[in-house]
């Protein structure tokens, strides 16, 4: 692959920024400075460094972000900070968020450039579990809990699929759902006459939010986590 293409894919900059970085001598291939963008490299075997930092090439990248409140789940936005700003420097430029959390929701968000996996995890047919830690405005009755477990009317064609409810205390619960409709959890609680005051996603399919990640922290998935996402 051409060196400039590689550097763009690694998100070092645009084609012209990369050209300038090369000219300024910021890039080495196997410890020798290279300034020509058209130089062919072997991305699997060559050691390519930008400003002294080795760039690790992989076709697919997988990240777990503990999304903080106040940023939008989008690749770009004119007004708001996006989740992309929390990815580590040098991530591939084609990484995108899998699904969406509201601006005021925090917690587990997967970002990858593995389109097949994303498609699979988001497919309504796959019924992928997502668990949320939900803080409520006031306590739920047993009858309201039962409604959530059986399915509620949130104004869609069908009732929501049965959810799992685990009350942690009067106004806090774990809610596990298998769908991902717009504002789904908030609309479900509204449908039973309650209100979500704080929402945090703690699982997504086989993934569990790493408790060592503070809001805004992001790390690559381990090989074991990646494998688990592919398991049926
Ligand atoms: N349900 C919501 O209402 N909001 C989210 O961000 C995720 C699920």
Image: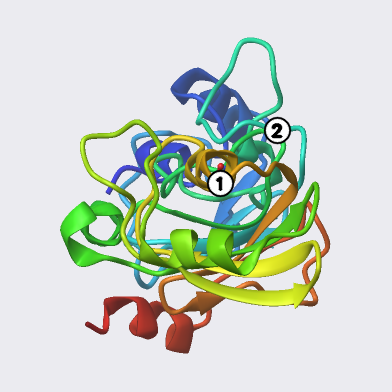
Q: Which mark is residue 71?
A: 2
Q: Which mark is residue 192?
A: 1
Percent from the top left, x then y, of residue 181? Answer: 38, 41
Outermost residue to the left: 125
Q: Which mark is residue 111?
A: none
Is the CB of the residue bearing disc 1 within 8 angstroms of ligand 1? no
Name the quarter where the C terminus is drawn: bottom left
Q: Is residue 175 left or right of residue 151?
A: right
Which of pointers 1 and 2 indicates the residue nearer the eye?
Answer: 1
With respect to residue 113, does 93 lie above or below?
above
Q: Give residue 32's quadrant in the image.
A: bottom right
Q: Residues within 10 Å of mark 1 (few under 14, many from 20)?
A: some
Percent from the top left, x then y, of residue 160? Answer: 34, 51
Q: Residues within 10 Å of mark 2 (few under 14, many from 20)?
A: many
Q: Residue at x 43, y 79 (%)?
A: 206
Q: Residue at x 46, y 82 (%)?
A: 225
Percent from the top left, x then y, of residue 76? Answer: 54, 23
Q: Is residue 179 left or right of residue 101?
A: left
Outermost residue to the top: 78
Of the pair 186 and 221, the residue shown nearer to us: 186
Q: Give residue 52's quadrant in the image.
A: bottom right
Q: Describe the element under mark 1 as helix, strand or loop.
A: loop
């Amino acid at each position: 692959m051409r060196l400039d293409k590689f550097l763009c894919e690694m998100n070092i900059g645009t084609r012209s920024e990369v050209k300038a970085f090369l000219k300024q001598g910021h890039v080495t291939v196997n410890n020798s400075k290279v300034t020509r963008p058209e130089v062919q490299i072997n991305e699997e075997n060559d050691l390519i460094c930008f400003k002294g930092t080795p760039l690790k090439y992989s076709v697919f990248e997988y990240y777990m972000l503990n999304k903080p409140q106040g940023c939008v789940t989008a690749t770009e936005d004119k007004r708001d900070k996006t989740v992309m700003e929390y990815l580590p420097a040098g991530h591939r430029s084609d990484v995108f968020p899998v699904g969406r959390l509201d601006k005021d929701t925090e917690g587990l968000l997967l970002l990858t450039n593995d389109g097949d996996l994303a498609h699979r995890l988001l497919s309504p047919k796959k019924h992928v579990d997502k668990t949320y830690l939900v803080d409520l405005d006031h306590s739920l009755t047993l009858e309201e809990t039962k409604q959530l477990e059986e399915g509620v009317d949130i104004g869609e064609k069908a009732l929501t699929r049965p959810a799992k409810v685990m009350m942690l205390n009067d106004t806090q619960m774990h809610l596990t759902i298998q769908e991902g409709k717009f504002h789904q959890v908030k609309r479900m609680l509204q449908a039973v006459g309650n209100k979500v005051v704080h929402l945090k996603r703690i699982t997504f399919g086989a993934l569990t939010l790493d408790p060592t990640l503070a809001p805004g922290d992001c790390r690559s998935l381990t090989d074991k986590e990646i494998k688990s996402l592919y398991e049926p």
